[in-house]
């Protein structure tokens, strides 16, 4: 694909092929889907050295362009991460097949029997940036849920993503699945994204962007198909007056510093005024020892004048870097007020030994994932037992939180009768 006209024509073929594949995928036996996923896992492990070599070349090119450390981290594959990708495939294969699963059933006084059962969404297009593992996670989840998927990865990791995709796609036909159930857009021409956003003449049923704010904003503003997405992961940890100090320190450091470039990394720390003076020396030392830069409000800077002053924009920033903004709040009520103003609706955690306070926080905070005495880094489909995820949905319709296999289904209503007709 070269010029825009030929890209448009080629993309329409891809859309038509995906639609044709959905007819077979909707009734594909679970055994065939699971066989394909396990075979793909084996292929990825067998081709590990080749995949890592491709990835290394793209990492060197990215470093030459002086891209950010967080971006490099998202691009990087290691033997351990390759192992995690293969494990995720096998985990997805072991999940119950959602297609045809009974959600509910009921009877009507006229004798009609009604069942609501899960069904594939259809054709799903996933547009993503620097994480090559998304190629496998997204393709595998779509496949398990009986959908056809069109994958468009970022130009920075296009070769690595293609190497992973080949393992997945190569497992389809030998497992009895249509070859076009998964398709990968190899061109880096942005016109291909525009074609996907157009909906490919109605062939695309759902668009899922996974990447930075500019990508997601573009998809949300230009898409002519439904979009499932989130913008920022501005995640918070709130340390309550009744928190266990060791738990609070461990959870905060892990939430921020385990991996700073993931969307579940904490970006703001809220500390109850009643415990701030007591906990701050140990907490700040642990964060700084881990390499974290701190920016604080006036109240925390009165306790520790060495902290840089936070600006208004800090409370709205997804750093994806070892930087943490810190604010002192008036108890759980103050924490909830801060979240209402600044939260992106992704993930929030409370650290407290007071179950009543925890309950107030879990009910009052309106985010997709809420944790009590646990790190925000558990905001992950694999940690939820979903095998993997396509992303974290922060909207209120269809799906919230990790988007796994079940979240990529819809449902249909099946009505059984014995000759009933509706009276005039």
Image (spheres, grey):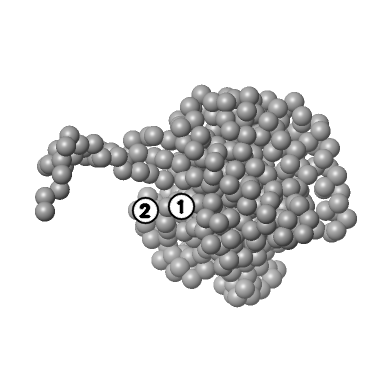
Whether residue 190 can be seen here: no
Q: In percent of the image, x 31 and y 43: which residue is there?
A: 413
User: Mark 2 or mark 1, which is nearer to you?
Assistant: 1
Q: In this view, does 27 lie to the left or right of 69?
A: left
Residue 358, image x and y in percent?
Answer: 40, 53
Label disc, if present, on residue 233 of the rendered structure = none
Residue at mark 2 = 359
Q: What element carries label 2?
A: helix
Residue at screen point 64% across, 48% down: 13
Please state which of residues 244 and 407 is positioned toward the viewer in this rendering. Answer: 407
Location of residue 338 in the rendering, given as x and y in whole percent from the top left corner:
48, 68
Q: Which residue is found at the position 72% from the left and 53% from the top?
A: 154
**Where does the image place residue 422, in percent across and percent down from the top left?**
15, 48
Reply above or below: 305 against 78: below
Q: Mark 1 points at which residue?
A: 400
Work out whether residue 86 or residue 227 is closer to the camera in this orientation and state it.
Answer: 227
């Amino acid at each position: 694909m070269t010029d825009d006209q030929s890209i448009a024509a080629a993309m329409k073929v891809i859309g038509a092929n995906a639609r044709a594949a959905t007819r077979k995928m909707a009734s594909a036996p679970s055994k065939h889907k699971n066989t394909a996923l396990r075979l793909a896992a084996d292929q990825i492990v067998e081709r590990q050295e080749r995949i890592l070599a491709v990835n290394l070349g793209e990492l060197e090119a990215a470093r030459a362009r002086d891209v950010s450390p967080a971006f490099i981290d998202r691009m990087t594959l290691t033997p351990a991460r390759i192992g995690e990708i293969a494990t995720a495939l096998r985990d997805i294969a072991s999940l119950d097949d959602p297609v045809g699963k009974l959600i509910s059933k009921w009877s009507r006084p006229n004798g009609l029997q009604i069942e609501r059962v899960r069904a594939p969404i259809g054709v799903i297009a996933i547009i993503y940036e620097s994480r090559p593992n998304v190629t496998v996670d997204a393709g595998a989840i779509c496949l398990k849920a009986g959908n056809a998927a069109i994958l468009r990865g970022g130009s920075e990791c296009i070769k690595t993503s293609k190497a992973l995709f080949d393992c997945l796609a190569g497992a389809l036909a030998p497992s009895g699945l249509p070859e076009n159930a998964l398709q990968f857009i190899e061109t880096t021409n942005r016109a291909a994204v525009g074609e996907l956003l157009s909906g490919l003449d109605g062939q695309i049923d759902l668009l899922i962007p996974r990447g930075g704010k500019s990508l997601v904003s573009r998809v949300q503003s230009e898409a002519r198909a439904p979009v499932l997405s989130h913008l920022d992961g501005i995640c918070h940890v709130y340390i309550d007056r009744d928190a266990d100090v060791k738990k609070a320190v461990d959870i905060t450091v892990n939430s921020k510093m385990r991996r700073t470039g993931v969307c579940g990394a904490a970006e703001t720390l809220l500390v109850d005024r009643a415990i701030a003076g007591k906990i701050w020396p140990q907490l700040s030392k642990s964060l700084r020892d881990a390499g974290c830069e701190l920016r604080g409000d006036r109240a925390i800077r009165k306790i520790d004048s060495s902290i840089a002053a936070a600006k208004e924009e800090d409370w709205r920033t997804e750093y994806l870097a070892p930087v943490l903004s810190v604010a002192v709040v008036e108890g759980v009520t103050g924490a909830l007020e801060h979240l209402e103003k600044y939260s992106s609706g992704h993930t929030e955690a409370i650290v407290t030994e007071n179950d009543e306070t925890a309950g107030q926080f879990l009910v009052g905070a309106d985010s997709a994932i809420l944790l009590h005495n646990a790190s925000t880094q558990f905001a992950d489909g694999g940690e939820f037992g979903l095998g993997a995820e396509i992303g974290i949905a922060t909207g209120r319709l269809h799906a919230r939180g990790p988007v796994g296999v079940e979240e990529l289904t819809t449902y249909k209503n099946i009505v059984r009768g014995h000759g009933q007709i509706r009276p005039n």
